[in-house]
Image (spheres, rainbow, N blue to C red):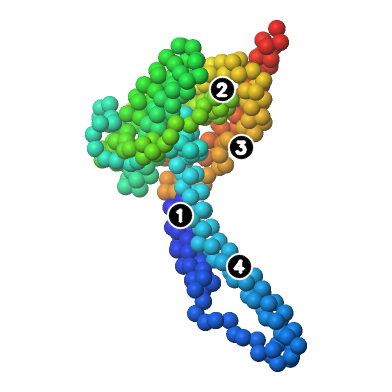
Amino acid sequence: MGGVIVFVLFLAVVSTYLGYKLLRSVMFPTRPAPPIPVARDANPDMAHRAGAKLGRFTVGIGRAIAFVFGLGLMVWPWLLMWLISSMSDGGHNSKGRVLRIRNRARLPERAEGAGWTDGAVTLQGSLAPQEQAVLGDLWLLTARMEHASIAAFSQLSLHLAALGAPARLLEWSHRAALEEIRHAQRCYAIASAITGQTHRAGPIVELATTRAETIDLRRLAVGSLVDGCLAEGMAADVAARSASRCEEPAMRATLDMIAREEQGHAELAWAVLEWAIDQGGETVHRAVAARLDKLAREVSPKMPPIAGLDDAVLARYGVLDQDTLGQIALARLATVQDRARGLLGLVDHRLAA
């Protein structure tokens, strides 16, 4: 992935320069358009004016096309960079409920220092420098994703309170946020043990500038389906499979804890979904059914293999290969689709009774 980013960045710089030169030549031409003396000489009855107008029209069309092309040269590579960045931040390897701000997944910034570990972690095996670099980044990404889930559950609590949800759902969501704190602390501790540096959560800048979004039962239900039932269910499956292959005791214990508690978070999402459908009636029912038909798109496409380490080394340290992740995602997707269709039918039966 690093090589791809460097190559795209090189293309972005070259393309931006070419686009800038083209735009500059269009907006600030260095020489005026040549006159058309032949038209004047050949048309003493003033018909040359039509030819002049046609010439100006043709030049104008050419400049407009050049302007659009130049602008495209400047913009397209940066859009591609943004897409790659979104894919790496969003994560194909889901670690739980996603913190969404302005419809994009957000993570805390990377930072060093104390405050986000729950004690030192000792690894039994020794790591080569390349293994330290790759595994350190992967576990640090996991820690940042777990940290973002804390704020995501805080958002969920606010939304539940705004919509008049029962106390058990608010209590459950606050308990889940506390569990995510524990997940993040353990993952930061593991990342620190791998790299030899002390890692902590940095700020989530977007949280300081975001405005409160309008929430209703329809959005709550769809969000619970996608970010809860699917994403957190997948996170539980991934952690459980990772734990079964992991050979480091501290990592295996952490993954076991995450798998157990993320499964509880998925059950919270199902409870919220059922309540929202029950309260929202036909409008929410239709929204959930429509999103359910498109849910396969929520499972991210397979990413390239992780460079530098083979799958066996990754598995020993709690990281699954891409093929296994794809299998887990498809299996969880099928489970969620079946259960959600059953839930929609159950609510239909209750509403009709």
At 66% from the left and 90% from the top, the residue drawn is 37
Give the spatial CA distance, label 3 vs label 2: 22 Å
The residue that label 2 is drawn on is: 217
The residue that label 1 is drawn on is: 5
Residue 47, quarter of picture: bottom right
At 51% from the left and 76% from the top, the residue drawn is 29
> What is the secondary structure assignment of the residue under circle 4?
helix
Give the spatial CA distance, label 1 vs label 2: 40 Å
Assess whether mark 3 and mark 4 are in contact (beta carbons under 8 angstroms): no
Residue type at mark 4 is Ala
At 49% from the left and 73% from the top, the residue drawn is 28
Q: Is residue 95 visible?
A: no
Q: Of label 4 and label 2, which has the lower sequence position?
A: 4
Give the spatial CA distance, label 4 vs label 1: 32 Å
> What is the secondary structure assignment of the residue under circle 2?
helix
At label 3, counting other C-alpha atoms closer than 10 Å, the crowd grade (few under 14, some 14-19, many 20 or more) is few
The residue that label 3 is drawn on is: 297
The residue that label 4 is drawn on is: 64
